[in-house]
Image (spheres, helix red, strand yellow):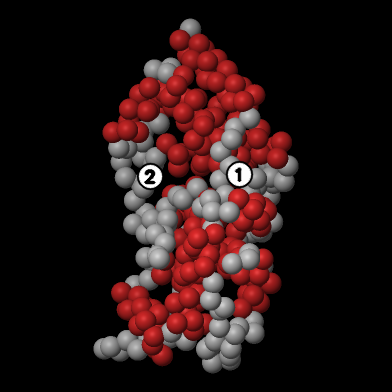
Amino acid sequence: MTIRRAKPDAHDITCRQAVALMTDYLDGALGPDDCALMEAHLAECESCAEHLRQIRITVAVTGRIREEDLDPAIREDLMDLYRRWRSDRDK
Amino acid sequence: MRLTITTDPEGQRGCSPLDSDEGELLARLRAGDEDAFAGLVDRHHAAMVRLARGYVRSAAVAEEVAQDAWLGLLRGLDRFEGRSSLRTWLFRIVVNRAISAGLHERQHLPVDDSELQEDRGRFSQDGWWITPPVHWADEAVDRMVAPELAAQVRQLVAELPDAQRQVVTLRDVEGLPSADVCSILGISEGNQRVLLHRARARIRRHLEQEAVW
């Protein structure tokens, strides 16, 4: 994006552009100019601000789907692997 | 109420030189400390299997790839110099094993045009909302811990196109920083964000449609 103005305005980018840039925005990957445009837009556009909140919720919900329970038999297999590695190395 | 984002924009985790905890863990592993290895297995094995599933279709093969990666880690342990975090290294071994075993063709990066259609109808031709998002973010905060929601999202992630699943699994499920994910998957930052964007859009849409807020 090459739009440059002294003072970013909510209408410098469209809602479609704002939505398209949200992942970059959350990653801190926007340059300072684009970041300013984005923030000016978000400050004025409640729908885009809501969309961004929903993306944040989405990230948070996705972060909760980890399944940590490890099959004890697999864990034991891996521990055997480690013991074999150790004894081979120490021979 | 605001949620704290779990991404790490600085991308520093795992990229910095070994911190002292990790250095100590490495020393214990090399010394043959079973507790150290067990801790590592408990922390990462499930994630490794999930990652391998991005490359192979069968759960059994993904499990084999992950187990094989542990062997790779042990064999390389004495030579590991800590230029990446142990986790990044381990995950990279998983990816390499999954690919080099020839188990599955490397997925093409974004080509799925159906993804681009998701926003059709939401914006006018000049780019403003026609159908603005229904408000549910605030209501969702209280209910996002519901186990049935996790089950739905887990299923949704499993059904994503491979490349999207790989990226969203590492970024949003495992919480890895962008730079590590690019290094593990061998893709550019830009490509990674396109894939992440699409995966998140799809999950967001599901939350909007399916979840009862």
Q: Can residue B210 be spotted in the picture?
A: yes
Question: What is the x, y in percent for residue B201?
Answer: 58, 68
- Chain on which label 1 sits: B
- Residue type at numbered disc 1: Arg
Real-space CA distance between mark 2 and mark 1, rounded to the nearest whole angstrom: 20 Å
Direction from residue B187 to residue A71 in the image, left or right: right
> How far from the left and from the top, in percent, is residue A91?
48, 7
Residue contact at pointers 2 and 1, CB within 8 angstroms: no
> At numbered mark 1, what does the secondary structure look like: helix, strand or loop?
helix
Residue at figure coordinates x 60%, y 44% from the top left: B50
* Farthest left residue in view: A6
Residue B164 vs A7, above or below: the answer is above
**In this rendering, is residue B120 above or below A59?**
below
Q: Residues within 10 Å of mark 1 (few under 14, many from 20)?
A: many
* Residue at 50% in and 48% down: B174
Q: Nearer the viewer, mark 2 or mark 1?
A: 1
Residue A54, image x, y percentages: 51, 69
Q: Nearer the viewer, residue B154 or B23?
A: B154
Left or right? Give the position of A66 relative to B102: left
| Image x and y of residue A18, in percent | 46, 79
Q: Is residue A69 left or right of residue B16?
A: right
Three-letter code for the amino acid on which mark 2 is drawn: Gly
Q: Which residue is labeled 1 in the image? A: B50
Given residues B204 and B150, the one toward you in this image is B150
Mark 2 highlights which residue?
B14
Instruction: Give the letter of the chain under mark 2.
Output: B
